[in-house]
């Protein structure tokens, strides 16, 4: 094994020294979600009975827990608001507006994840120089969510938001890595507050079960300032390729054409079969090439912490990368409890399944999604 990186050749070693996780207290099981969806189907089909019988409108089909689990591996999801989602007359989270002087929902979530990450890294807010909020949707365009979080935590320095959909966290890690390596910050927080229930159409059978809400936080710093047990970032690799197969057209220009307001494309929409067919080989190829370029044999990898979107997708990617079937220990699953949490999924897996690592053990954090976008980070336990 030859790892193509050395401190003398490429500057200081950079590590992930801590992670944090905030999980909303409310959870929705597949059975609960299906019950609401099927009530909606009954109402819709009754309201459109004449058109359905005339053949000018298609009847909606029931969903089922068996269908959801077979299609995705998801069994439940955490949400910031359960009652609104399970109201068949609403089917969207009920989140009241807040005064501008109050903390926003994403800021409130982020603080809880950050507090755990700082504790895990043995850091104080005063140790942080920069905050990057990286997630698939911000609840407002500005002020930047990162600046609000920075202010709430009493962090000096600067903050900014970035969005690469489900790959936001790994892209954020690379930005933090390069920032610390360049010397423009000593310690950077990457925060992923995902309120995915806000951009999900719970009335669409093909996707009503996919997403959940959560927030993760990551501390990135130089190895010489980190507490023991940190994970050295050996290499990061990013890739984007334009595709319309995962899309959300919601934005401030919607008011420029009233005919589009409330249209189906203003929430998450995907062509799942095409995404599966096209993304799996791209992700596997990127990870395999990255490991090859670093001189790391796959038998030296202890774990793959993959984006948590679809169980079959993860199993196939893992098999392609490792050249064999892998166990759940080697590629842990959290989407059964959390569902797809966009950028946070791979970080939840890393947060929960790394304590058994010994010095020198290696793994890959990898996320992928809309764009298309892929981010992979090779780490080694110090």
Image (tube, helix red, strand yellow):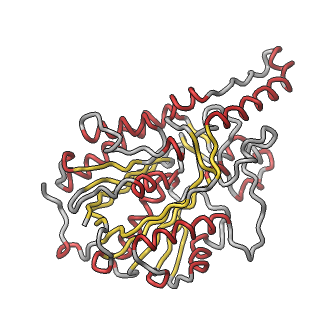
The answer to which image quadrant residue 316 occupies is top left
| Quarter of the image where the C terminus is located | bottom left
Q: Is residue 330 above or below residue 20?
A: above
Image point (79%, 43%), residue name: 90
373, above or below 315, in the image: below
Residue name at image x 34 percent, y 56 percent: 354
* Residue 253 appears left or right of 76: right
- Vertical comparison of 220 with 356: above or below: below
Vertical placement of 310 versus 112: above or below?
above
The residue under the point 78% across, 38% down is 88
Task: Say which quarter of the image contains residue 221.
Answer: bottom left
Residue at 38 percent across and 65 percent down: it is 174
Where residue 244 appears, x then y in whole percent?
A: 54, 42
Estimate the x, y position of residue 308 in percent, counting from the top left.
Answer: 46, 45
- Percent across and percent down for residue 296 are 19, 52
Residue 100 is at least partly visible in this image:
yes
The one nearer the camera, 60 or 126, is: 126
Q: Position of residue 373 (x, y in %)?
A: 44, 50
Camera-nearest residue between 190 and 55: 190
């Amino acid at each position: 094994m030859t790892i193509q990186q050395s401190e003398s050749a490429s500057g200081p070693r950079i590590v992930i020294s801590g992670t944090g996780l905030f999980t909303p207290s409310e959870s929705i099981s597949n059975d609960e979600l299906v019950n609401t969806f099927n009530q909606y189907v009954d109402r819709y089909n009754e309201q459109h009975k004449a058109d359905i019988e005339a053949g000018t409108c298609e009847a909606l089909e029931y969903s089922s827990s068996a269908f959801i689990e077979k299609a995705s591996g998801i069994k439940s999801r955490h949400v910031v608001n359960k009652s609104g989602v399970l109201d068949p007359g609403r089917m969207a989270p009920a989140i009241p507006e807040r005064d501008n002087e109050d903390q926003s929902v994403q800021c409130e979530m982020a603080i809880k994840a950050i507090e755990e990450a700082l504790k895990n890294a043995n850091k104080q807010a005063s140790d942080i120089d920069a905050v990057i909020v990286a997630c698939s949707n911000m609840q407002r365009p500005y002020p930047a969510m990162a600046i609000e979080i920075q202010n709430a935590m009493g962090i000096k320095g600067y903050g900014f938001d970035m969005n690469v959909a489900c790959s936001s966290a790994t892209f954020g890690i690379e930005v933090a890595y390069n920032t610390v390596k360049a010397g423009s910050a000593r310690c950077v927080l990457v925060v992923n507050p995902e309120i995915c229930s806000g951009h999900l159409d719970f009335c669409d059978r093909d996707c009503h079960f996919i997403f959940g809400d959560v927030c993760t936080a990551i501390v990135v710093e130089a190895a010489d300032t980190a507490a023991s047990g940190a994970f050295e970032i050996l290499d990061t690799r990013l890739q984007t390729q334009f595709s319309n197969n995962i899309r959300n057209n919601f934005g401030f220009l919607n008011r420029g054409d009233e005919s589009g307001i409330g249209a189906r494309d203003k929430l998450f929409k995907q062509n799942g079969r095409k995404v599966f067919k096209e993304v799996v080989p791209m992700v596997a190829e990127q990870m395999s090439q990255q490991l090859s370029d670093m001189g790391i044999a796959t038998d030296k990898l202890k774990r793959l912490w993959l984006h948590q979107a679809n169980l079959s997708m993860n199993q196939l990617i893992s098999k392609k990368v490792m050249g064999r079937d892998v166990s759940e220990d080697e590629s842990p699953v959290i989407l059964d409890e959390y569902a797809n949490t966009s950028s946070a999924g791979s970080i939840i897996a890393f947060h929960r399944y790394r304590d058994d690592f010994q010095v020198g053990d290696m793994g890959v954090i990898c996320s992928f999604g809309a764009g298309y976008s892929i981010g992979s980070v090779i780490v080694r336990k110090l």
